[in-house]
Image (cartoon, rainbow, N blue to C red):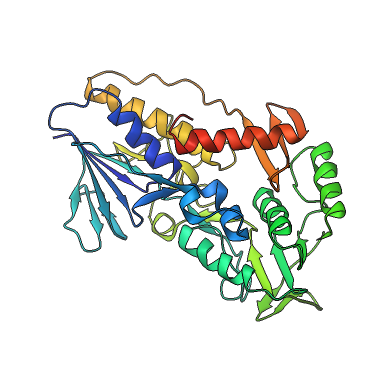
Amino acid sequence: MNNVVVLGGGYGGLTVVHELLESDLPKGAKIFLVDRMPYQGLKTEYYALAAGTVTDVDIRVAFPVHPQLEVVYGEIAGVDFERRTVAVSGHDPLPYDSLVIALGCTDNYHGIAGASEFSCSIQSLSATRRTYQQLNDVRPGGQVTIVGGGLSGVEIASELRESRPDINIRILDRSASILNGFSPRLQKYVASWFHEHDVEMRSHISITSLEQGVIHNGAEAILTDVTVWTAGIQPVPLVRNLDLPKDKQGRLTVNEYHELPDVPNVFVVGDCASSTFSPSGQLAEAMGKQVAQVIKARWDGKEPKLGRIKLKGVLGSLGKKAGFGLMGSTPIIGRVPRVLKSGVLWMSKHHLG
Protein backbone atom coordinates (compact mmCIF):
# COMPACT_ATOMS: atom_id res chain seq x y z
CA MET A 1 0.00 0.00 0.00
CA ASN A 2 0.97 3.63 -0.50
CA ASN A 3 0.22 5.09 2.91
CA VAL A 4 1.15 8.75 3.24
CA VAL A 5 0.98 10.18 6.76
CA VAL A 6 1.11 13.97 7.03
CA LEU A 7 1.80 15.39 10.49
CA GLY A 8 0.31 18.87 10.77
CA GLY A 9 -2.46 20.60 8.83
CA GLY A 10 -0.77 23.98 8.42
CA TYR A 11 0.52 25.64 5.27
CA GLY A 12 3.06 22.97 4.37
CA GLY A 13 1.17 19.84 5.39
CA LEU A 14 -2.12 20.88 3.84
CA THR A 15 -0.36 21.79 0.60
CA VAL A 16 1.04 18.26 0.38
CA VAL A 17 -2.45 16.84 0.95
CA HIS A 18 -4.11 19.08 -1.65
CA GLU A 19 -1.43 18.44 -4.27
CA LEU A 20 -1.70 14.67 -3.84
CA LEU A 21 -5.50 14.65 -3.87
CA GLU A 22 -5.59 16.73 -7.04
CA SER A 23 -3.46 14.13 -8.86
CA ASP A 24 -4.40 10.62 -9.90
CA LEU A 25 -3.91 8.73 -6.67
CA PRO A 26 -2.90 5.09 -7.08
CA LYS A 27 -5.63 2.61 -6.30
CA GLY A 28 -5.29 1.62 -2.67
CA ALA A 29 -3.31 4.72 -1.73
CA LYS A 30 -4.36 6.32 1.53
CA ILE A 31 -3.49 9.70 3.00
CA PHE A 32 -3.70 10.32 6.74
CA LEU A 33 -3.68 13.94 7.91
CA VAL A 34 -2.92 14.20 11.63
CA ASP A 35 -3.81 17.38 13.50
CA ARG A 36 -5.23 18.34 16.88
CA MET A 37 -7.62 20.85 15.27
CA PRO A 38 -10.54 20.07 12.92
CA TYR A 39 -9.45 22.78 10.45
CA GLN A 40 -6.43 24.79 9.39
CA GLY A 41 -5.83 28.09 11.13
CA LEU A 42 -4.27 30.74 8.90
CA LYS A 43 -1.29 31.45 11.12
CA THR A 44 -0.19 34.58 9.28
CA GLU A 45 -3.45 36.17 10.47
CA TYR A 46 -3.24 35.18 14.15
CA TYR A 47 -2.08 38.69 15.01
CA ALA A 48 -5.48 40.05 13.88
CA LEU A 49 -7.37 37.48 15.95
CA ALA A 50 -5.29 38.41 19.00
CA ALA A 51 -6.02 42.10 18.43
CA GLY A 52 -9.75 41.45 18.03
CA THR A 53 -10.11 42.77 14.47
CA VAL A 54 -11.14 39.41 12.97
CA THR A 55 -13.15 36.54 14.38
CA ASP A 56 -12.03 32.98 14.86
CA VAL A 57 -14.10 31.73 11.93
CA ASP A 58 -12.52 34.30 9.59
CA ILE A 59 -9.16 32.54 9.71
CA ARG A 60 -10.28 28.92 9.48
CA VAL A 61 -9.86 26.76 6.39
CA ALA A 62 -11.74 23.46 6.23
CA PHE A 63 -9.75 20.31 5.63
CA PRO A 64 -10.54 18.62 2.30
CA VAL A 65 -12.95 15.71 2.04
CA HIS A 66 -11.92 12.78 -0.14
CA PRO A 67 -12.53 9.00 -0.04
CA GLN A 68 -8.77 8.36 0.11
CA LEU A 69 -8.14 10.89 2.89
CA GLU A 70 -8.62 10.24 6.59
CA VAL A 71 -8.21 13.08 9.07
CA VAL A 72 -6.93 11.85 12.42
CA TYR A 73 -7.44 14.15 15.41
CA GLY A 74 -5.05 13.92 18.32
CA GLU A 75 -1.66 14.74 19.79
CA ILE A 76 1.35 13.12 18.15
CA ALA A 77 3.15 11.07 20.79
CA GLY A 78 6.12 9.94 18.73
CA VAL A 79 7.52 8.50 15.51
CA ASP A 80 9.14 5.07 15.15
CA PHE A 81 11.34 5.26 12.06
CA GLU A 82 12.32 1.58 12.26
CA ARG A 83 8.75 0.27 12.40
CA ARG A 84 7.56 3.15 10.17
CA THR A 85 4.68 4.08 12.46
CA VAL A 86 3.36 7.22 14.13
CA ALA A 87 1.88 7.13 17.63
CA VAL A 88 -1.18 9.37 18.06
CA SER A 89 -3.02 9.78 21.36
CA GLY A 90 -6.35 7.94 21.37
CA HIS A 91 -5.62 6.19 18.08
CA ASP A 92 -3.97 3.01 16.86
CA PRO A 93 -0.41 3.47 15.51
CA LEU A 94 -0.46 4.79 11.95
CA PRO A 95 1.75 2.85 9.52
CA TYR A 96 3.33 4.87 6.74
CA ASP A 97 5.22 4.35 3.50
CA SER A 98 5.87 8.08 3.18
CA LEU A 99 5.86 10.47 6.14
CA VAL A 100 5.66 14.26 6.03
CA ILE A 101 6.65 16.19 9.16
CA ALA A 102 4.97 19.59 8.97
CA LEU A 103 4.48 20.46 12.63
CA GLY A 104 5.51 24.10 12.55
CA CYS A 105 7.11 26.00 15.38
CA THR A 106 6.68 27.36 18.84
CA ASP A 107 8.07 30.38 20.67
CA ASN A 108 11.77 30.59 21.43
CA TYR A 109 12.28 32.20 24.82
CA HIS A 110 16.08 32.09 24.55
CA GLY A 111 16.39 30.78 28.10
CA ILE A 112 15.01 34.00 29.61
CA ALA A 113 13.58 33.32 33.07
CA GLY A 114 9.83 33.84 33.33
CA ALA A 115 9.32 34.47 29.61
CA SER A 116 7.06 31.49 28.99
CA GLU A 117 5.09 31.98 32.23
CA PHE A 118 4.51 35.73 32.03
CA SER A 119 3.97 36.43 28.34
CA CYS A 120 1.29 35.63 25.76
CA SER A 121 1.79 33.81 22.47
CA ILE A 122 0.38 33.87 18.94
CA GLN A 123 2.07 30.65 17.81
CA SER A 124 -1.01 28.43 17.99
CA LEU A 125 -4.71 29.06 17.56
CA SER A 126 -5.45 28.08 21.15
CA ALA A 127 -2.71 30.37 22.48
CA THR A 128 -3.92 33.21 20.26
CA ARG A 129 -7.44 32.89 21.64
CA ARG A 130 -6.05 33.26 25.16
CA THR A 131 -3.97 36.24 24.06
CA TYR A 132 -7.07 37.89 22.59
CA GLN A 133 -8.81 37.51 25.94
CA GLN A 134 -5.93 39.09 27.85
CA LEU A 135 -5.43 41.96 25.42
CA ASN A 136 -9.07 42.88 25.34
CA ASP A 137 -9.36 42.71 29.13
CA VAL A 138 -6.71 45.43 29.53
CA ARG A 139 -8.26 48.45 31.22
CA PRO A 140 -8.38 51.80 29.35
CA GLY A 141 -5.03 53.48 29.84
CA GLY A 142 -3.34 50.14 30.52
CA GLN A 143 -0.01 49.06 29.08
CA VAL A 144 0.63 46.33 26.50
CA THR A 145 4.23 45.43 25.70
CA ILE A 146 5.25 43.49 22.62
CA VAL A 147 8.64 41.82 22.81
CA GLY A 148 10.18 41.56 19.35
CA GLY A 149 10.09 44.12 16.56
CA GLY A 150 10.02 41.75 13.60
CA LEU A 151 7.11 41.19 11.22
CA SER A 152 4.81 39.57 13.79
CA GLY A 153 5.50 42.20 16.44
CA VAL A 154 4.90 45.06 14.02
CA GLU A 155 1.64 43.56 12.75
CA ILE A 156 0.13 42.86 16.15
CA ALA A 157 1.15 46.30 17.47
CA SER A 158 -0.47 48.13 14.55
CA GLU A 159 -3.58 45.97 14.55
CA LEU A 160 -3.99 46.38 18.30
CA ARG A 161 -3.65 50.13 17.95
CA GLU A 162 -6.68 50.16 15.61
CA SER A 163 -8.61 47.82 17.90
CA ARG A 164 -7.69 49.53 21.18
CA PRO A 165 -6.99 53.26 20.75
CA ASP A 166 -7.53 53.62 24.51
CA ILE A 167 -4.44 51.69 25.67
CA ASN A 168 -0.68 52.26 25.64
CA ILE A 169 1.38 50.06 23.33
CA ARG A 170 5.14 49.64 23.19
CA ILE A 171 7.52 47.43 21.24
CA LEU A 172 10.81 46.27 22.74
CA ASP A 173 13.56 45.02 20.45
CA ARG A 174 17.21 44.14 20.95
CA SER A 175 18.21 45.56 17.55
CA ALA A 176 18.83 49.18 16.61
CA SER A 177 15.54 49.37 14.72
CA ILE A 178 12.29 47.52 14.23
CA LEU A 179 12.16 45.17 11.23
CA ASN A 180 15.85 44.37 11.51
CA GLY A 181 16.98 42.89 8.19
CA PHE A 182 14.46 44.84 6.12
CA SER A 183 15.46 47.83 4.00
CA PRO A 184 16.00 51.21 5.73
CA ARG A 185 13.14 52.64 3.69
CA LEU A 186 10.68 50.13 5.14
CA GLN A 187 12.05 50.58 8.64
CA LYS A 188 11.64 54.35 8.38
CA TYR A 189 8.11 54.07 6.98
CA VAL A 190 6.91 51.71 9.72
CA ALA A 191 8.62 53.76 12.45
CA SER A 192 6.88 56.87 11.10
CA TRP A 193 3.51 55.07 11.21
CA PHE A 194 4.13 54.10 14.82
CA HIS A 195 5.11 57.65 15.79
CA GLU A 196 1.96 58.95 14.13
CA HIS A 197 -0.21 56.38 15.91
CA ASP A 198 1.42 56.72 19.33
CA VAL A 199 3.14 53.34 19.54
CA GLU A 200 6.32 53.55 21.62
CA MET A 201 9.43 51.87 20.20
CA ARG A 202 12.47 51.00 22.28
CA SER A 203 15.63 49.53 20.79
CA HIS A 204 18.78 47.88 22.18
CA ILE A 205 16.72 46.17 24.88
CA SER A 206 18.33 43.13 26.51
CA ILE A 207 15.67 41.36 28.57
CA THR A 208 17.06 39.40 31.49
CA SER A 209 13.84 38.09 33.08
CA LEU A 210 10.08 38.50 33.34
CA GLU A 211 7.72 38.36 36.27
CA GLN A 212 4.06 39.26 36.67
CA GLY A 213 3.66 42.82 35.40
CA VAL A 214 7.39 43.48 35.08
CA ILE A 215 9.98 43.05 32.32
CA HIS A 216 13.57 43.33 33.52
CA ASN A 217 15.99 45.04 31.14
CA GLY A 218 19.10 44.57 33.21
CA ALA A 219 18.64 46.85 36.23
CA GLU A 220 15.63 48.60 34.66
CA ALA A 221 12.13 47.40 35.56
CA ILE A 222 9.65 47.98 32.72
CA LEU A 223 6.07 47.85 33.97
CA THR A 224 3.36 46.24 31.85
CA ASP A 225 -0.14 44.83 32.12
CA VAL A 226 0.16 42.30 29.29
CA THR A 227 3.26 41.10 27.44
CA VAL A 228 3.07 39.48 23.99
CA TRP A 229 6.12 37.46 22.93
CA THR A 230 7.14 37.68 19.26
CA ALA A 231 10.90 37.46 19.74
CA GLY A 232 11.79 34.30 17.90
CA ILE A 233 10.66 30.79 17.03
CA GLN A 234 11.97 27.24 17.20
CA PRO A 235 10.72 23.84 16.01
CA VAL A 236 8.15 22.07 18.17
CA PRO A 237 9.44 19.81 21.00
CA LEU A 238 8.80 16.57 19.10
CA VAL A 239 11.20 17.70 16.37
CA ARG A 240 13.74 19.15 18.80
CA ASN A 241 13.84 15.82 20.64
CA LEU A 242 14.58 13.72 17.54
CA ASP A 243 18.14 12.38 17.53
CA LEU A 244 18.81 13.50 13.97
CA PRO A 245 21.13 16.09 12.35
CA LYS A 246 19.90 19.67 12.78
CA ASP A 247 21.06 23.17 11.91
CA LYS A 248 21.93 25.92 14.42
CA GLN A 249 18.24 26.83 14.74
CA GLY A 250 17.32 23.25 15.67
CA ARG A 251 15.66 22.55 12.31
CA LEU A 252 16.06 19.13 10.74
CA THR A 253 18.68 18.83 8.01
CA VAL A 254 17.17 17.69 4.71
CA ASN A 255 18.43 16.85 1.22
CA GLU A 256 17.37 18.36 -2.11
CA TYR A 257 14.07 16.45 -1.91
CA HIS A 258 13.22 17.88 1.56
CA GLU A 259 13.90 14.38 2.86
CA LEU A 260 15.86 13.19 5.89
CA PRO A 261 19.18 12.03 4.37
CA ASP A 262 19.42 8.86 6.44
CA VAL A 263 15.70 8.06 6.68
CA PRO A 264 14.23 7.45 3.20
CA ASN A 265 10.71 8.70 2.42
CA VAL A 266 10.52 10.87 5.52
CA PHE A 267 10.07 14.49 4.44
CA VAL A 268 10.18 17.72 6.44
CA VAL A 269 8.55 20.98 5.38
CA GLY A 270 8.03 24.42 6.86
CA ASP A 271 9.46 25.71 10.12
CA CYS A 272 10.87 22.30 11.09
CA ALA A 273 13.11 22.04 8.00
CA SER A 274 16.52 23.59 7.51
CA SER A 275 16.51 26.14 4.69
CA THR A 276 18.45 29.11 3.34
CA PHE A 277 15.16 31.05 3.39
CA SER A 278 13.58 32.58 6.48
CA PRO A 279 10.59 30.61 7.80
CA SER A 280 7.24 31.65 6.31
CA GLY A 281 3.91 30.24 5.23
CA GLN A 282 4.90 30.89 1.63
CA LEU A 283 8.06 28.81 2.02
CA ALA A 284 6.14 25.99 3.71
CA GLU A 285 3.70 25.86 0.79
CA ALA A 286 6.53 25.83 -1.75
CA MET A 287 8.20 22.96 0.08
CA GLY A 288 4.88 21.14 0.31
CA LYS A 289 4.36 21.33 -3.45
CA GLN A 290 7.79 19.88 -4.08
CA VAL A 291 7.35 17.06 -1.57
CA ALA A 292 4.09 16.10 -3.30
CA GLN A 293 6.01 16.06 -6.61
CA VAL A 294 8.61 13.72 -5.12
CA ILE A 295 6.01 11.33 -3.69
CA LYS A 296 4.08 11.22 -6.98
CA ALA A 297 7.26 10.67 -9.01
CA ARG A 298 8.30 7.75 -6.81
CA TRP A 299 4.83 6.23 -7.08
CA ASP A 300 5.41 6.24 -10.84
CA GLY A 301 8.91 4.80 -10.49
CA LYS A 302 10.52 8.01 -11.75
CA GLU A 303 13.39 10.16 -10.53
CA PRO A 304 12.03 13.39 -9.05
CA LYS A 305 13.11 16.58 -10.81
CA LEU A 306 12.63 19.71 -8.74
CA GLY A 307 13.22 23.31 -9.67
CA ARG A 308 14.69 25.97 -7.42
CA ILE A 309 12.23 27.47 -4.94
CA LYS A 310 11.44 31.08 -5.77
CA LEU A 311 9.52 33.14 -3.24
CA LYS A 312 7.35 36.04 -4.37
CA GLY A 313 8.17 38.47 -1.59
CA VAL A 314 7.08 39.56 1.88
CA LEU A 315 3.96 41.51 2.81
CA GLY A 316 3.10 43.07 6.15
CA SER A 317 0.14 45.09 7.39
CA LEU A 318 -0.17 48.24 9.45
CA GLY A 319 -3.78 47.97 10.46
CA LYS A 320 -6.43 47.67 7.76
CA LYS A 321 -5.42 50.62 5.57
CA ALA A 322 -1.64 50.55 5.21
CA GLY A 323 1.12 48.04 4.71
CA PHE A 324 4.65 47.40 3.58
CA GLY A 325 6.57 44.72 1.79
CA LEU A 326 9.24 43.51 -0.56
CA MET A 327 8.44 42.31 -4.06
CA GLY A 328 11.70 40.68 -5.02
CA SER A 329 14.15 43.32 -3.82
CA THR A 330 11.78 46.27 -4.36
CA PRO A 331 10.29 47.90 -1.24
CA ILE A 332 6.61 48.83 -1.42
CA ILE A 333 4.70 50.92 1.11
CA GLY A 334 1.22 52.34 1.66
CA ARG A 335 -2.16 51.09 0.53
CA VAL A 336 -0.99 48.74 -2.25
CA PRO A 337 0.81 46.13 -0.10
CA ARG A 338 -2.17 46.03 2.27
CA VAL A 339 -4.52 45.30 -0.64
CA LEU A 340 -2.10 42.68 -1.95
CA LYS A 341 -1.98 40.99 1.44
CA SER A 342 -5.78 40.86 1.58
CA GLY A 343 -5.71 39.19 -1.83
CA VAL A 344 -3.17 36.62 -0.67
CA LEU A 345 -5.38 35.85 2.34
CA TRP A 346 -8.41 35.33 0.09
CA MET A 347 -6.41 32.98 -2.13
CA SER A 348 -5.18 31.01 0.88
CA LYS A 349 -8.73 30.55 2.17
CA HIS A 350 -9.81 29.24 -1.23
CA HIS A 351 -6.67 27.14 -1.82
CA LEU A 352 -5.60 29.18 -4.83
CA GLY A 353 -2.15 30.21 -3.62
Residue name at image x 50 percent, y 33 percent: 347
Residue name at image x 56 percent, y 46 percent: 44
x, y percent for residue 257 = 40, 30
Seen in the picture, residue 230 relative to 342 is either above or below; the reply is below
Q: Is residue 130 left or right of residue 225?
A: left
Q: Is residue 245 left or right of residue 196?
A: left
Residue name at image x 17 percent, y 33 percent: 29
In-front residue for pair 86/289: 289
x, y percent for residue 5 = 26, 43
Q: Is residue 48 visible?
A: yes
Q: Is residue 251 visible?
A: no
User: Can you name the residue that lies furthest to the bottom here?
Assistant: 212
Q: Is residue 66 left or right of residue 161?
A: left
x, y percent for residue 320 = 69, 45
Seen in the picture, residue 114 relative to 60 is either above or below; the reply is below
In-front residue for pair 80/40: 40
In-front residue for pair 176/352: 352
Figure quadrant of residue 313: top right
Residue name at image x 22 percent, y 20 percent: 301
Query: The N terminus is located in which quarter?
Result: top left
Seen in the picture, residue 33 relative to 113 is either above or below; the reply is above
Numbered disc total: 0
